[in-house]
Image: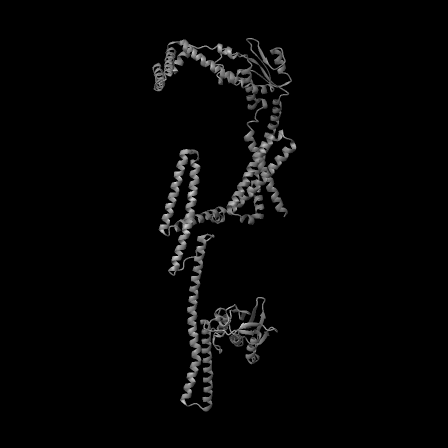
Amino acid sequence: MDTKWKNSVRLVVYSLLLVCGLSGLYLLFDQGERYIERDYYDTYQYREQLRIFASFANLLEHGYPTLQEAQAAITVSPQEIADYRAQMAPLSEQMESVRVEYGTLIEQATAVDNSELVEFYMEEQARKLEQLIQLFKDDEAVAAQIRQEKERHLSEIYKERESYLPQYQELRDLFDYYLYRPATGQAYTNMNVQDASTARDELYGSNYAHVVEYAPEVALNLFYFMNFETTIADKPQVEGWIGVPVNSPIVAKAVVYQRQQAAVWLFGVAGILMLAIVLFRFKAMMASVSAVNRRWASSYAKLPLDIKVVAMLLALAVGLIGPISAAHKVVLFVVVPASMGLLGLAATLAVAAIALALTLQQGQALASGLRSSEDWRREWSRTWLRRGFVRIGVWAQRVVQAVQSSFIYRSVGAQLLTLAVIWIGLGYIGGAMVHYYDPMFYMPLLVILSLAGIAAFLLASRQLGHLNRIARAADQLAKGEMPPPLASKGSGVLGALSESIDTLRSGVRLLQHEHAKSERLKTELITNISHDLRTPLTSIITYTGLLEAGEATAEERAAYVGIISQKSKRLKTMIDDLFEVSSMTSGNARLHLERSDLVQLMQQALAEHKETMDASAIQFRISLPERPIFADVDGQKLWRAFDNLIGNMVKYALDHTRAYISMEQTDNEEAQIIFKNISRYEINDSAEELLERFKRGDASRHTEGSGLGLAIAHSIISLHHGILKLETDGDLFKATVILKLQLPLGEEGT
């Protein structure tokens, strides 16, 4: 147990080193370039902020002329006039365009008989043509046009210039500056100083963390982008300084930068060292992985392959995201409380380490379990993905079978196809109408109609296919063939019809089975009758022949006559029994019902067999109620049934065993009589077949029974609407008679 714990600890330690190493390496690649500068004032972020501030100052405070002054200073050169005309189309084309435009308007005004509008359009046409001619002949007209466009452009530039004021006001709180124009001595500053020399001394003092001398390249040339300097003739030259006071928020950023810089490089270098340790101890780490895997390899092997892969990918994702998150937490570590920073960093590294440890374990377990193509095939067969494909395949196969079934009868398939075409056609017609009125809803409607059409077609195919299978099964049943079961699901009309067809099919199969059984029993009946009737008849013929020969002595003749008499009586008994059971099964027998005591009938039957029962080696246990049980029965016939059942026990019960006869009245107004014994002969037939005629427990037929006793008893009990139930369990034979104490109305005398 101690060794297992050590292996787990080693694996967690190696995983933690790996996570820290990856985090440090990522931190250097992601943040190293940002923190490679000497201090914050050399970073791109600070320089960009400084340039934006200088640009705003240059744009908003350096004594540029007002909008009116700038517009008054606009000049137009001859080259600009030539360029302006070059951009225009030839005079002839422009004049023709004006004539066509106003000619159409004049014709429309003439058509409505509006003379004032006609006169207005003609004057406008003449004025436009005159302006065009002046533009191509008069330089002053062109210059005025160009000057007007420049004035409009200047208005837009000055308006845009004013939009930068709010942002500039925010930046002024970060910097102190002193800017001045050498030519005029005019100064622009937010410092309380008298001249440039005083401002310079103060800015380079201890109250400022960083100072830069203003130069044109320090500022972003917003004038260039705004086409400002190219428009204004007087461009002021500015000099001065911009400084960062020690109480500026920029200084706080510089301090944070220094701390983050130290954290990034320390963590990054430490991460590289940890990665080196992991690589150096790689074999030991994998040995720990293998040792830990042996503890849960059997449980892991039971999982499907796709679940293993998904679990490993999830663990790998957490293990890789963890170092990235830890790297960002290292940068934020210096700007949050130390306790929160350490707790968050430790939690992130711990979770990532556990995830990487699980990734290594699962990867090693997967690699060891998939070493051959046979391993891959075995694992693939157990995946949920394959099971999903199989289910999709089964579903697709069912769909295909449903479509095929709908074409078992071509007329039905043709109707289905026609309905599908009509449905699709109506859908496209509706879609076209929607597209005409509102194209935006065309594609969604087309998708909905297509899905609905496919669903309706498949549903109709399924129902029609089911109907066709039912019809084919009915045809096969009508021809005497046995169709496969429909196995229908659902509670609709087709479901009920398929259940009826399956019930009919089961009935036909049962009838076929009963018919085969009846044919077999008929053959056995003929064989048994022939055997049982021929045996006594043969004896009669034989001994009659001996008597006719006249060679026998008087004693022998007397013995022969006795045998002939005995066999004749046996033959008569068998014929009477056969006639009786045939009469009962054919429905010709009639009952003479009277109120009788079943207990007394049983006692009379037992009395008939008392001498035989006492002389036998069987111990009979009789359990009859002390009180009488009255029922409306035919006493003579019911006594015969009891007599046959008792005689069956005497003939076929095993010597030196116990036989039981009991009677009781149940709560259901029924009498239950049970005959139970151990059979002398092996019972090879089923309990149901023992009730058939000429079936005997003595398969070798050495006893004197006719084989009709149980059949006669069964017929008598059935005439009384009772039940004779036989049960066999090895050599145990049990007959149960259940009689209703009160017959249904209208059954008397039947």
Q: Is residue 121 placed above or below 724 in the rendered structure?
A: above
Visual colour scheme: one colour
Query: Residue 274's image quarter?
Result: top right
Q: Residue furthest bottom?
A: 554
Residue sitting at x 61%, y 10%: 195
Percent from the top left, x then y, of residue 78?
Answer: 41, 10
Q: Is residue 219 placed above or below 689 in the rendered structure?
A: above
Residue sitting at x 45%, y 48%: 395
| Res. 157 in view | yes
Percent from the top left, x then y, of residue 656?
Answer: 57, 76
Residue sitting at x 42%, y 74%: 527
Q: Is residue 67 placed above or below 373 in the rendered structure?
A: above
Query: Residue 332's image quarter?
Result: top right
Comparing 248 with 108, the one in front is: 108
Comparing 484 with 497, the one in front is: 497
Residue 52 relative to residue 538: left or right: right
Percent from the top left, x then y, of residue 50?
Answer: 56, 20
Give the tally of numbered discs. 0
| Res. 729 in view | no
Percent from the top left, x then y, of residue 525?
Answer: 43, 73
